[in-house]
Amino acid sequence: MQTELHPSIADTHSGRRAQEILRSCVHCGFCNATCPTYLATGDELDGPRGRIYLMKEMLEAGEANAVAQNHLDRCLTCRACETTCPSGVAYGELLEVGRSLAESAGSRGFVTDVIRRWLKAVVPDVRAFRRWATLGGWVRWLLPVRLRRQLPEVAELRPIVGSTHERKLLVLEGCVQQVATPTVNAALAERLGERGFQVLTAAGEACCGSLNLHLGDEGGARAQMRHNVDVLWPLLGELDAVLSTASGCGVTYKDYGRLLADDADYADKAAALSAKVLDVAEFCEREELQFDRAADVERVAWQAPCTLQHGQQVNGTVERLLERAGYALVDVADGHLCCGSAGTYSVLQPDLSERLRDAKLNALCANTPDVIATANVGCQTHLASASGIPVRHWVELLR
Ligand code: SF4
Ligand code: SF4
């Protein structure tokens, strides 16, 4: 694709990278076939090829308009298009640049602007999010149905089980997961403690930065990333691995090396941290760990989060671990399509999000599983908001 970026962008680090990515796209449109928003609306501008055109125009003009902003907002960042693309177009990276520039289109309307500011201020701050979620729980019956469904139950905090094994693992706590599903890391610590690992958490860990990044606040995201590098880098020498049980956080941590590559003070440390991060499934497979299944569950429908299958390209690993534990995995159609959770998407794009969630639940439940298993807190709470059967993190199914 021929491009001539605006002079204000052309010579920046992100401008040069955007130019490379734009030039790698050959407009074949194969990616549209697996794009959930294109399949839902049939609008070319809601597909990856159309969005790439919009971003090219924005980057050449040096600013965005409301149409481009709207179609970029409607992207799930699921990256199914990257998995499909035969030319290796790094759509997710391009979208980061496009989303930052899309902020130049100005207001999205008073209510949406307020919600976006609230999400950026509250969700990454665990204490603030817990307070708001608790408050929301008290007045749940007063809230509109949609908002009521989005509100996570505030789970009881459980300590990570202590042990003195020599091999140390750090498990990332995240922000939303600490409030909505802290039992996942507690279950992991028990299972790995029984197998000779000491599972630790790091005081001071902040949100991974993905929420701000998806909302076009690259500066805020990078500040959170630098903070986490400062907290975690001094611990790396003692650790076997840094584990993620929320694939949405894991995919971002694995990308810190790239995201901070132009920061001379942080580039090497960020790359070292990224190299140490593993999704918990990768770790269990690497260590050849064996688990048993729960006595009361047999048939499992596996929902692979986009951040695991497309973002981290971890495919088949959880399935193998569950099958080795004795579970029967039921067939699920269209497993490559997003469930509609996508971070803050379920709040900011509720119509599309609910359509995708309902289609995903139909596919997951078609072969009568006992439980739906997933690997990311956002997918888990989103699916659970409308599911007739339990939705669990797969780690909680291990015995
Ligand atoms: S992103 Fe890839 S699949 Fe999509 S139009 Fe461009 S080259 Fe084709
Ligand atoms: S990231 Fe997902 S929603 Fe966005 S263009 Fe790609 S396939 Fe479509």
Image (spheres, helix red, strand yellow):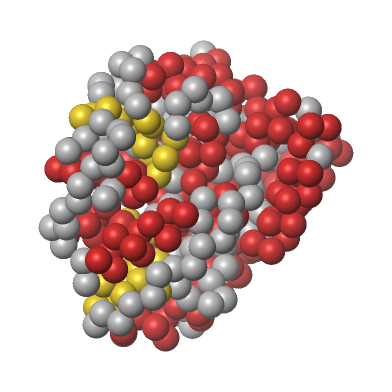
Q: Position of residue 47 (x, y in %)?
A: 49, 25
- Residue 7 appears left or right of 80: right
Question: From where the camera sits, is residue 256 visible?
Answer: no
Total tally of numbered discs in the picture = 0
Name the quadrant containing residue 24. top left
Question: Which residue is pictured at 26% across the width and 31% down the height?
Answer: 298
Q: Is residue 398 left or right of residue 285?
A: right
User: Residue 8, percent across and down?
Assistant: 63, 57
Q: Residue at x 68, y 56 (%)?
A: 130
Q: Is residue 203 above or below residue 348?
A: below
Q: As drawn, is 150 to the left or to the right of 196?
A: right
Q: Can residue 132 be seen in this view?
A: yes
Compare residues 200 and 233 and report the one nearer the observer. 200
Towards the viewer: 197 or 77: 197
Q: Tell me what residue is drawn at x 18 percent, y 43 percent.
A: 325
Residue 284 location, quadrant: bottom left
**Which residue is farthest right?**
110
Residue occupying image coordinates x 23% and y 42%: 293
Judge whether 10 appears above or below 353 on screen. Answer: below
Question: Is 385 or 77 nearer to us in this picture?
Answer: 385
Q: Quadrant of the N terminus?
A: top left
Up-down relation of residue 341 to residue 182 (above or below): above
